[in-house]
Image: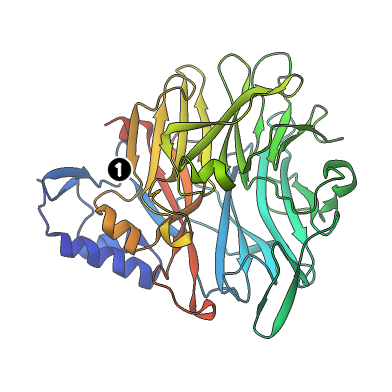
Amino acid sequence: MKQYLPISFLKLGYLLCLIFGSIEMALSVTGLRHNSFVLGDSTVKGTVGKKAGVTTTRVFSHSSDGYNSFRIPCLAKAKNGNLIAFAEGRKQSILDYGDIDLVYKISTNNGGTWSKLKVVVAEGDGTWGNPTAVTDQETGRIWLFLSWNDGTHSQHGGSFNGKTYTAIKEWGQRKIFATYSDDNGQSWVKPVDYTNSLLPSNYSWDAVGPGIGIQVANGAHKGRLIIPAGRRNIYSDDHGASWKYAPIPAGTFEGTIVELSDNSLMRNDRGVGAKWSNSHTRFIATGTIENGFSVFTKDDHLPDPRCQASILRYSFSPNILLFLNPVQNDKDGAANRCIMTIRLSEDDGATWKYAKLLYPGLDKDSLCRGGLGGYSSLMQTADDAVAAMTEVNHNVVKVPVAQRRFSIDFHKFTIDWIKE
């Protein structure tokens, strides 16, 4: 029997989520774990089950485990099916610089429950970030690429809590590291510095991903590992024994990459500067490692507030691509990254036939006021569902930096739900 509940109960549920850290718990408290509920004039699916709906859990809660905030999610799947949720553990503040560790949790049951927080790397008071993972399905090794700078520098310079940070202006002040796991994500080797071979000599600021890389599934380069990075793709044809990079056209940053059905590749990136200001969209380029990529062009079907996003090849037959980003695009800035929308394409991203909001039942104003959105990561689970991690900004209304907090939610849903 359908339950018809006023919107105030729904908002109460999400308020409880923000307080207690679990939307699943909040749904239980407000009685919304039913087949459907009515919001305004439309019926919105809100089931928690095997065939429909969204299950949402707070996987990294702010002000916990010794960390102020958690940002920049990355979701990997081990060959045995383990899900590994990575994040930047920001110790002192929500700022992009300072003492930032790379942390993770593991789920052995497709996201049903999560381990205690573990640390990939926390050396010194520098910034370990931009986690970008790819699993080699042939060897089982999970590669994790990271960007790093020391505890005295930041991208643009700045200050916090009495400490001044110098802007990164020289090659090598921002570095590229990689680590790997051979035990399905349980442990990680000490990160290795790849800056000399993978950072172009004319770069100062740089970043990999963040999010996920891919392993090529078809064609002459089957098995190739690819990590998207600033103005280039990093790749390996020998299971990570060696890594190289291939340049791509400029004008974007924080890139995603996906394999298309014709064996070519597509980058779907965050625009920068005038590119974004003139369109407020995502930017697309296609090509190959060997022959290069086309110039990035705007995709008017994908509005974007100048934010990182996620793309995932779910299957080749049927042809299914998934894309996730915040679509509130009237302006940029962390406070405007909301209305997280998952889209499905059946034609390699030429069109996006289906779309759903990740927090079904909340109106757009509530999504934005609640700070439900930001950076994200997508992954197919071992039980063929779709998993997503998304940021939660707890302080959309401007407050002093020291008072701001971020958390990360985990969502699980099905392809059928997207198509409903």
Residue 295 showing in the rendered view: yes
Disc 1: CA contacts within 10 A as few (<14), some (14-19) or many (>=20): many
Q: Is residue 201 left or right of residue 290?
A: right
- Toward the viewer: 156 or 210? 156
Question: Toward which corner of the image does residue 288 lie, by quadrant?
Answer: top right
Query: Which residue lies most toward the right here?
Result: 196
**Which residue is pictured at 11% across the width and 45% down the height?**
41
**Which residue is pictured at 70% across the width and 43% down the height?**
230
- How many numbered marks, from 0 up? 1
Query: Which residue lies most toward the bottom here?
Result: 162
Residue annotated with mark 1 = 53
Residue 378 showing in the rendered view: no
Q: Is residue 160 left or right of residue 271?
A: right
**Which residue is pictured at 44% across the width and 51% down the height?**
112
**Local SS, label 1:** loop
- Toward the viewer: 91 or 274? 274
Rendered-image quadrant of the C terminus: top left
- Toward the viewer: 23 or 400? 400
Residue 378 picture location, percent across and down: 51, 42
Residue 261 picture location, percent across and down: 55, 16
Residue 401 picture location, percent across and down: 53, 77
Question: Toward which corner of the image does residue 223 lie, by quadrant?
Answer: top right
Residue type, numbered disc 1: Gly
Residue 71 picture location, percent across and down: 56, 61
Q: Is residue 256 left or right of residue 250?
A: left
Q: Is residue 49 left or right of residue 108?
A: left
